[in-house]
Amino acid sequence: AQSVTQPDIHITVSEGASLELRCNYSYGATPYLFWYVQSPGQGLQLLLKYFSGDTLVQGIKGFEAEFKRSQSSFNLRKPSVHWSDAAEYFCAVEPGGSYIPTFGRGTSLIVHP
Amino acid sequence: NAGVTQTPKFQVLKTGQSMTLQCAQDMNHNSMYWYRQDPGMGLRLIYYSASEGTTDKGEVPNGYNVSRLNKREFSLRLESAAPSQTSVYFCASREIMAGTQYFGPGTRLLVL
């Protein structure tokens, strides 16, 4: 069975600083990969996804993620964080064809002014 | 276009009471899911329905039942609520090949 690890429970950054959230997965083949964001009191919203092709994926709100097969990683990045980016971020991995993603435990992003 | 809607938003139950959480989507998606979210645990799949007429257990199905009433609606029932079922419950829907799951706003359940 697949698994996904988000090593950082909390990350604190200053507004305007760059951001990288880590995601590592365990799965035998290349899975489908997702990043979702959850604002307080809300449901999850898709930021970006990777199925195949170009390993650098652009998403909404200025986020991007890079799939690195050799490291089994799919890290999320943003060059300049805004206060409105404060939220919970979830990485998810899905074996192709299963249609059942497994979610990481989430990383809480705190943005200081 | 409301997306995924869930009712109720909040509920307080006593141990042993039953209730049904309702979920509906208006995007004509085939697949629907029920998750629970607990602090530090991420989202855990309770049940899912790949298409109308089918349901399957997820990671944490014990204590729950589901009904895929039609293509739009997927309900989650707690027959005898327990304090361990205190959680936030999310419903999601998805068009299979597109991959993106669309989530409802959640139901916050407290079992005393």
Image (spheres, rainbow, N blue to C red):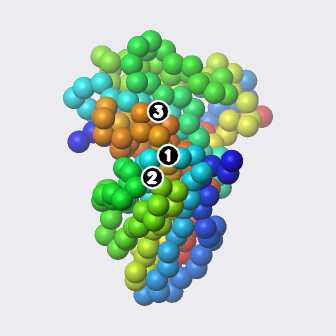
Q: Are marks 1 and 2 in contact (CB under 8 Å)?
A: yes
Q: Amino acid at mark 3?
A: Ala
Spatial CA span between label 3 and label 2: 14 Å
Check disc 2 and report the residue beneath it.
Answer: B32
Provide residue B51's location: percent of width, then percent of height.
Answer: 38, 51
Chain holding disc 2: B
The residue under the point 40% across, 24% down is: A51
Within 10 angstroms of label 1, few (less than 14), some, or many (20 or more) residues?
Answer: some
Residue projecting furthest to the top: A54
Secondary element at tag 2: strand
Disc 1 element: loop
Q: Which mark is residue B98?
A: 3
What amino acid does circle 1 point to? His
Q: Quick one: label 3 or label 2, which is nearer the N terminus?
A: 2
Left or right: A94, with B74 as reference point = left
Up the image or down, A13 lies above or below B60; here it is: above
- Label 1 vs label 3: CA separation? 10 Å
Tell me if residue B55 comes above or below residue A61 in the rendering. Answer: below
